[in-house]
Amino acid sequence: MLDLEKLAAVPNPPPFRSSSVERGIADSVAYLGSETAQRSLERDPYWPKWDSPWWHMLLLHELGEARQIPARASAAMVVGIDRLLHLFPIHPSDAPGADLQRDSACHCALGTMYPVLAACGIDVERALPWVRPWFVRYQMADGGLNCDPTAYLQTGECPSSMVGTVAPLEAMLPSNGGASEHSGFVSRAAGFLIERALIHGSRTVHNAGERGAAGAWRALTFPRFYFYDVLRGLAVLVRWAETAGQPLPEAAISAVVTALTERWPDGIVHVERQAHAKSTTILPSSDRSPSPRAPASTFPLLDATSQLGEPSEALTRQWTEARAGVLRLAQAGRLVSSEVG
């Protein structure tokens, strides 16, 4: 059982932001308005990690600063995404001759960028009408998705992925323009997170690696980009229950809420993990020649917001909002007792 009195007693910290984050925001906004950023978007909307317009835009949005993204950058991003394949290649015959790393998006990529573009004032449904049907098309039987195309070729099990599911669910919530005809997708995806109680990896053979990765989800990371942690999962489930008017099983969130309440008694959340660290990237070229993997680079705002052990403005705000949502659901009688998993 959740200790709602203890949860309600956690203070709501005032907004805070370091001078290094302020400088990093200004740096990223200036970059996104530059010709360098435009050329990068013309070459490729996504690559390279982590220092291309895609990642600057995602991080500004996570900080609540999407309004500062220059309109020319968001418009160019729409054009770049629309150049990609409008399907997720699963079989070799789906996209013959395509470079699947550079010519195709994945579920978590589209799921993370959709809310960014919406926050920039773009009518994403009109500009990219194929994106929301994409999520519905590739939802698996258990309500999840997986950015590994071979997962869709498995028989006898359903190897869905938390990472591949959480961003599409965020994108399809009504607050991000999700239309009522997609409520089935949203409820099934929310059910997937509920069944996993936000903390459990896949039980399947194909996605066995996720069981090992699941231990890291309890350590909160920032920026998220497309990565998963338990606070991100909690936040989207609470938003779903509130916007959809649905009950939320207490058992699905109790372990996470209790742990976060005990870990951050003053309400201020600190960065515990750098999920983006030690990544590699491909380096797009204008002649489309094959690119070897290279170490991913960073940028000032990414460095400033991902310092281990430092308080995180964005994570603190999300925890504050999630706590308030849990208490509202309890008051409305929609935090219900039932078993999950």
Image (tube, rainbow, N blue to C red):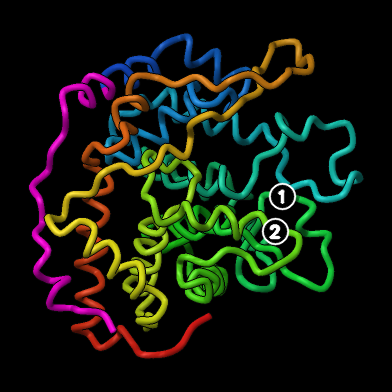
Residue 10, magenta (yes or no): yes
Of the numbered discs in the image, which one, if any, rests on residue 207? 2
Residue 86, magenta (yes or no): no
Q: Label 2 amino acid?
A: Asn
Query: Is 119 left, or right, of 96 in this rendering?
Result: left
Q: How many marks?
A: 2
Q: From mark 2 to mark 1, how far is it between C-alphas?
A: 9 Å
Q: Label 1 amino acid?
A: Asp
Of the numbered discs in the image, which one, if any, rests on residue 148? 1
Query: Is 260 left, or right, of 295 in this rendering?
Result: left
Region of the chain picked out in magenta, as a range? 1-25
Is 69 drawn above or below residue 136 in the view shown?
Answer: above
Q: Can you give x and y, in whole percent of width and height, for residue 262 in the image?
A: 22, 64
Q: Can you give x and y, in whole percent of width and height, for residue 293 in the image?
A: 68, 22
Residue at 75 percent across and 60 percent down: it is 206
Query: Is 18 left, or right, of 211 in this rendering?
Result: left
Query: Which of the two marks, 2 or 1, is nearer to us in this view?
Result: 2
Whether the residues at callouts 2 and 1 have beta carbons within 8 Å, the answer is: yes
Disc on the earlier residue, 2 or 1 = 1
Residue at 79 percent across and 46 percent down: it is 89
Of the numbered discs in the image, which one, if any, rests on residue 36? none
SS for callout 1? loop
